Image (cartoon, rainbow, N blue to C red):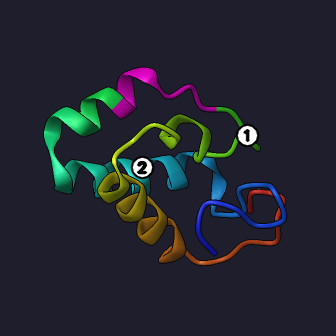
Amino acid sequence: MGLHAGGRLRQPGPDAAYRSALDAIRDIGEACAEAFRRTTRRWRGRELREPLDKAPLAVLAAAEKALADLPPTTGDGT
């Protein structure tokens, strides 16, 4: 499923997706995770791709994999 699904984040709620991406980024480096945590503003329906636009490819790949591993939802955050 990745970062996009029909233009919107379709993962188990924004908090689960954010935590999953943050944990994956932390595996790459604590500094990367801290930068992501400090600069990412979260709200329902916001794509996580936007704050990762300027991230190194390894960070983007790790976040995409973490989100793809989450179970799909109905699209309404449940």
First of labels 2, 1 by sequence position: 2
Stretch in magenta: 36-42
How many angstroms separate mark 2 from mark 1 (CA)?
Answer: 14 Å
Q: Amino acid at mark 1?
A: Arg
Quadrant position of the N terminus in the picture: bottom right
Residue 69 position in % (x across, y down): 47, 77
Query: Who's the residue at 53% across and 55% down the image?
Result: 17
8 sits to left or right of 23 = right
Please, what secondary structure does the residue beneath circle 2 have?
A: helix
- Quadrant housing residue 35: top left
Residue 16 position in % (x across, y down): 52, 54
Residue 21 position in % (x across, y down): 42, 53
- Quadrant housing residue 72: bottom right
Question: Residue under circle 1?
Answer: 44
Q: Residues within 10 Å of mark 1 (few under 14, many from 20)?
A: few
Residue 35 colored magenta? no
Count of marks placed on residues:
2
Q: Residues within 10 Å of mark 2 (few under 14, many from 20)?
A: some
Question: Residue under circle 2?
Answer: 19
Query: Who's the residue at 30% across and 58% down the image?
Result: 58
